[in-house]
Amino acid sequence: MAGDERGTDEALAAARRMYDQQVAELESIDDKALRTLRTDVIILGFVAAALTAGSPSDLNSFHWLPVVIAISSAVALFVSAFLCVGTYLITEIPLEVQSEDLRAAKYINQDAWVEASLPRLRTSISDIEHEIARNGDLLGFAMSFMLSGAVGLAYATGLVVAARSYSISPVQASIVPFGASALVAVLVMAKPYVSG
């Protein structure tokens, strides 16, 4: 009987450790979502500052290509910010012990309470696994949108600078960065095959 009781206590302690690890992972996802949101807001702040620094005629003097890329990138940053807020707000950490269990604890013996707590911990662990998967997916989408928005803004800025500095059209200026971007993408994707 003592060995059975000790086995239950060990199982409960192991389940509690797993629950605590999953809660920490979920909190880490939320923290990353907030940091990504801050980055989105900072980049959008720079975009707003750049737009207000110039006159409307400055914006009209740009070729349509960098403007379309910049608008698409700003929209990607807004989507990223929206997904980050959603990731943070929808997080629900299930409680492993309900309040009615705590009230009932003084009326039942400890062994019965421990025996009843183990299935609730298993259910909570399963619920947290679903939360981690859902929030992780949302955070992945948010970070992808943020990265594409930031890269797009840098690309549009490069097009404007190249077109203004060298008096060439943005379409001509886009050929070199586009080719360089494609080369970098190919090298990054090929790295696991080359080094492995």
Image (cartoon, rainbow, N blue to C red):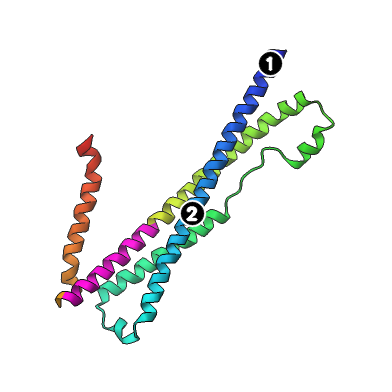
Residue at 42% across, 70% down: 45
What amino acid is found at the position of numbered circle 1 in the picture? Asp
Question: Which label number is shown at residue 53?
Answer: none
Q: What stretch is highlighted in magenta?
A: 145-165
Marks 1 and 2 sit apart, C-alpha to C-alpha, by: 44 Å
Residue 5 is at least partly visible in this image: yes
Residue at 39% across, 64% down: 76
Of mark 1 and mark 2, the one earlier in the sequence is 1
Could you tell me residue 113's position as x and y percent?
A: 75, 28
> If the image is split into quadrants, where does the N terminus sit?
top right
- Residue position for label 1: 4
Residue at 83% across, 32% down: 106
Residue at 67% across, 29% down: 118
Q: Identify the secondary structure beneath mark 2.
A: helix
Could you tell me residue 143's position as x and y percent?
A: 41, 54
Compared to residue 95, the image places residue 141 above or below, namely below
Tell me if mark 2 has few (under 14), some (14-19) or many (20+) residues whose alpha carbon lies within 10 angstroms of its own. many
> If the image is split into quadrants, where does the C terminus sit?
top left
Give the residue at the far right of this rendering. 107
Tell me if mark 1 has few (under 14), some (14-19) or many (20+) residues whose alpha carbon lies within 10 angstroms of its own. few
The magenta stretch spans residue 143 = no
Could you tell me residue 77's position as x and y percent?
A: 41, 64
- Residue position for label 2: 33
